[in-house]
């Protein structure tokens, strides 16, 4: 069992080193989870830590192992059986944490466990003919779902504030998706870019891959930092022992 877990964690680390999008996917879902958990107080730091651990296992290891298993987008040489082991360990471990949590949070948590497993497997393996691998499903899975999960795990119910925050997360995650998709295509699927931009004043600007990527990546970084700072603000508001 220890070898199995070590192998799975190793896959997660090796996979994360191959692409910033892998790390940003887990970070984004974790940030949205924290935002959902801290929308209202009080916040149980222990519950928040366990929920973050479950997301690390499911998204940081399991989902990304399935993503690489399906089509090899990062072109790694990790064996299929190792990726499958990582996926089982990650998603299974997250589900196990959820099952244990039912005894404290309630049976409603079971819905989040089932939906979470379905999203992790269905999205990354592109089940149902790829209909689960759309921009909308990305925004729902990595934006709205973590917000709702974080809120429910803390407060054992869903309220209008959580739904509103989930809608906000969906729109912002979709905006990030619209930027990351062309950026990923430039990094992974483009061999050569050539051309020029002629300004109205006659200035000529040479176009290459870096020129096209720069505004996309700067916008993605700005959006990422904005959501991180929002999460940090809520954490400080809910957990900091102000006098």
Image: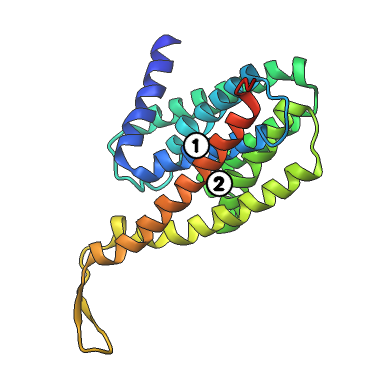
**178, above or below 195, in the image:** above
**How many numbered discs sit on the rendered protein?**
2
Q: Nearer the viewer, residue 13 or 69?
A: 13
Judge the density around disc 1: few (<14), some (14-19), many (≥20) Cα neighbours within 10 Å. many
Q: Is residue 21 left or right of residue 91?
A: left
Q: Quadrant of residue 136?
A: bottom right
Quadrant where the image shows the C terminus: top right
Image position, residue 121 (x, y; %)? 56, 39
Q: Is residue 73 left or right of residue 101?
A: left
How many angstroms separate mark 1 from mark 2 (CA)?
9 Å
In the image, what residue occupies the spot 29% across and 45% down? 75
In the image, what residue occupies the spot 66% across and 37% down? 36
Residue placed under numbered mark 1 in the picture: 63
Can residue 106 be seen in the rendering of this structure? yes
Can residue 132 be seen in the rendering of this structure? no
**Residue 119 — which label?**
none
């Amino acid at each position: 069992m220890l070898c199995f877990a070590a192998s799975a964690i190793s896959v997660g680390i090796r996979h994360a080193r191959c692409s910033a999008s892998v790390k940003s996917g887990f970070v984004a879902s974790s940030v949205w989870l924290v935002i959902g958990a801290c929308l209202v107080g009080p916040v149980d730091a222990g519950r928040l830590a366990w929920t973050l651990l479950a997301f690390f296992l499911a998204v940081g290891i399991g989902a990304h192992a399935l993503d690489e298993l399906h089509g090899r987008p990062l072109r790694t040489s990790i064996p299929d059986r190792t990726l499958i082991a990582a996926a089982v360990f990650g998603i299974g471990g997250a589900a196990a944490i959820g099952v244990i949590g039912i005894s404290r949070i309630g049976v409603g948590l079971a819905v989040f466990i089932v939906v979470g497993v379905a999203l992790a497997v269905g999205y990354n393996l592109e089940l149902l003919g790829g209909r689960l691998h759309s921009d909308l499903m990305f925004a729902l899975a990595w934006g709205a779902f973590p917000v709702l999960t974080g809120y429910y795990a803390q407060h054992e119910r869903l309220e209008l504030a959580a739904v509103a925050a989930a809608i906000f997360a969906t729109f912002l995650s979709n905006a990030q998706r619209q930027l990351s998709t062309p950026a990923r295509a430039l990094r992974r699927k483009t061999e050569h870019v050539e051309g020029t931009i002629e300004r109205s004043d006659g200035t000529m600007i040479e176009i290459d891959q870096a020129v096209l990527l720069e505004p996309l990546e700067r916008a993605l970084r700005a959006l990422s930092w904005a959501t991180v700072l929002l999460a940090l603000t809520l954490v400080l508001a809910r957990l900091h022992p102000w006098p």
